[in-house]
Amino acid sequence: MRRLFWLGLGVAAGVYVQRRVSEAARNLSPAGVGANLADGLRELGAGIGAFGAEVRAGMLAREQELTELVERRTGAGVPTYSEALAEEPAPGARARRAGA
C-alpha cells in the first residue's frame, strides 16, 4: 500500500512539473512573449484612458468652481472658452452673462 501511495504522489508531482515547464516554455516562445506584451500594452492603454477621463472630469469641476467664484466676487460674467477665443464677441454674449 505504501508503494502505491508514493507511486501516485510521484505521478501527480510529475504531471504538475511537466505542466509548469510546458507553460513556462510557451510563455518564453516568441508568440507567448508577444501575447504578454500585447496584454500589457492593452492594460496600459486602458489605464491611461481612465486617468485622462478622471483628469478631464476634475478640470471641468474645478473650472466650474472658479467660474462661480469669479462671478460671485466680481458680479461680471466669465466668458466661455470658445467666446474668449472668438475674434469678435458674440452679440449679446456679455449682456446674457451679466444678466444671468
Image (cartoon, rainbow, N blue to C red):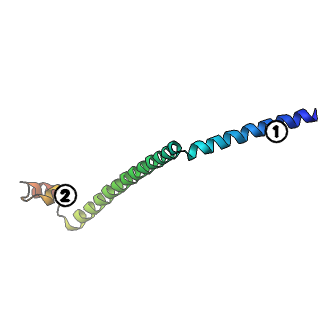
Label for residue 97? none
In this rendering, the label closer to the viewer, 1 or 2: 1
Q: Residue at x 28, y 57 (%)?
A: 64
Labelled disc at residue 10: 1
Dot 2: element: helix
Determine whether, in the image, residue 100 is placed left or right of residue 39: left
Residue 89 picture quarter: bottom left
Q: Nearer the viewer, residue 15 or 52?
A: 15
SS type, badge 1: helix
Q: Quadrant of the N terminus?
A: top right
Query: 66 or 85, which lies in front?
Result: 85
Q: Is residue 40 above or below residue 15?
A: below
In primary-sequence order, the first of circles 1 and 2 is 1
Callout 1: 10 Å neighbours few (<14), some, many (20+)? few
* Quadrant assignment, res 14: top right
Q: In x, y percent, where is residue 99? A: 14, 56
Q: Where is mark 2, residue-wise? A: 81
Q: Amino acid at mark 2?
A: Tyr
- The residue shown at (20%, 67%) is 74
Compared to residue 21, the image places residue 8 above or below, namely above
